[in-house]
Image (tube, grey):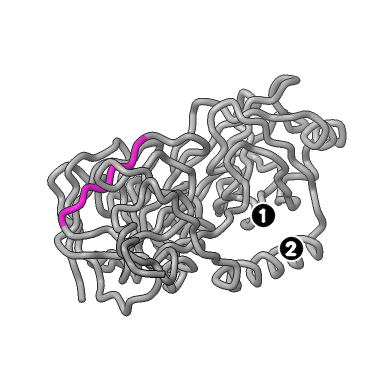
Amino acid sequence: MSAQLRILRAGPGLTLQDMGRGGCLALGLSRGGAADRLALAEGAALLGHEADTLALEMAAMGGEFEATDDIRIALTGAPMRATIDGEPVAWHASHLLPAGARLSIGAVTRGCYGYLHVGGGFVAEAFLGAGSTHLAAGIGAVLQEGDWLETGADKGGQTGLLLEPEDRFAGGPVRLTASFQTHQFAEAERARLQSEPLHRAARANRMGVALKPQGGGYHIEGGRNVVSEIVLPGDIQITGDGTPFVLMSECQTTGGYPRIGTVLPCDLPRVAQAPAGAELRFRFVDLNEAVELERTEAKRRAELGKHRRPLIRDPRQMRDLLSYQLISGVVAGDEDI
């Protein structure tokens, strides 16, 4: 059974996102898709979906929503304050959203991007094999108050499940592989990248994240740019003033700034979710280690469903508490004993 979700109030950055459009670089279109692809896998595990199921991405703030029918939902990614008809609900968990109930999602408490998943996934017209919005390419648009979102048929399943997320919402370690221009940076510059903390700057969006080094900008020997060539999410470009930019899901497809390294895909969610001012520490790994790390992470994501556990609910916040038989053998109190 499918339903509709109405947006009663919209935060500034609501878009529908899946894993994006791979294989379109020759068309001048970058992958796009969710800024935090791990959050899609977590939502899929909570609801029993495929990881590529379309979800609602919320940048910094959510909104208020109402469903036409009972639907299952899951909340993943950066934690946000959420309530259903005024009663708090847990993040990184699945819930039942009754028909007509108000789901309110406020600002992030950590991280940058939160995700709302629905049973059956959201439905959008596919373009080049995906339903995700790609703002930089003009595919789709930011969702607004009054929009209606179609949901797919939900095969059903449990709610009230919790998944402990990977803690990636306050910066931390990030692993790199060498890129095409890494060797053109002096050994001292490469060493400094790994020894000093970099902080996420205020300049950040779905195209890229600027970083602020403690010891000033990074510079390539000779100060050269390079012939424009293909770039990908995770590449760290060094602009003319020495600022490192980590390219994100909606990055351009080609660029002429030298790249000092490339963030492993398994660590890119940590960069995407780092709030302004968060400290990131980079470390190079060789290609063999990078491949093994990616294999391990792919296996972990595929098995997320095995790590779900029942959500412990607060009895004070259970509207249906009286429907539970909490004590067996209850008597009225006036029986002869």
Q: In the figure, residue 55 lies in which quadrant?
A: bottom left
Left or right: 99 with respect to 309? left
Q: Residue at x 62, y 47 (%)?
A: 167
Q: Which residue is mark 1?
A: 264
As for residue 110 lying within the magenta part, the answer is no
Contact (CB < 8 A) between labels 2 and 1?
yes
How many marks are shown on the rendered structure? 2
Q: Is residue 205 among what the camera can see?
A: yes
Q: Where's residue 51, x and y in %?
A: 46, 69
Rendered location of residue 64, percent (x, y): 24, 43
Is residue 130 shown above or below 218? below
Give coordinates of residue 83: x percent, y percent: 32, 44
Highlighted range, magenta = 100-106
Left or right of 145? Residue 282 is right
- The residue closer to the viewer here, 29 or 209, is 209
Q: Amino acid at mark 2?
A: Leu
Q: Quadrant of the N terminus?
A: bottom left
Asked where in the image residue 122 lies, by quadrant, the reply is bottom left
Q: Which mark is residue 293?
A: 2
Q: Position of residue 218 (x, y in %)?
A: 72, 28
Q: Point out the image quarter for the C terminus.
A: bottom left
Q: Is residue 194 above or below residue 93?
A: above
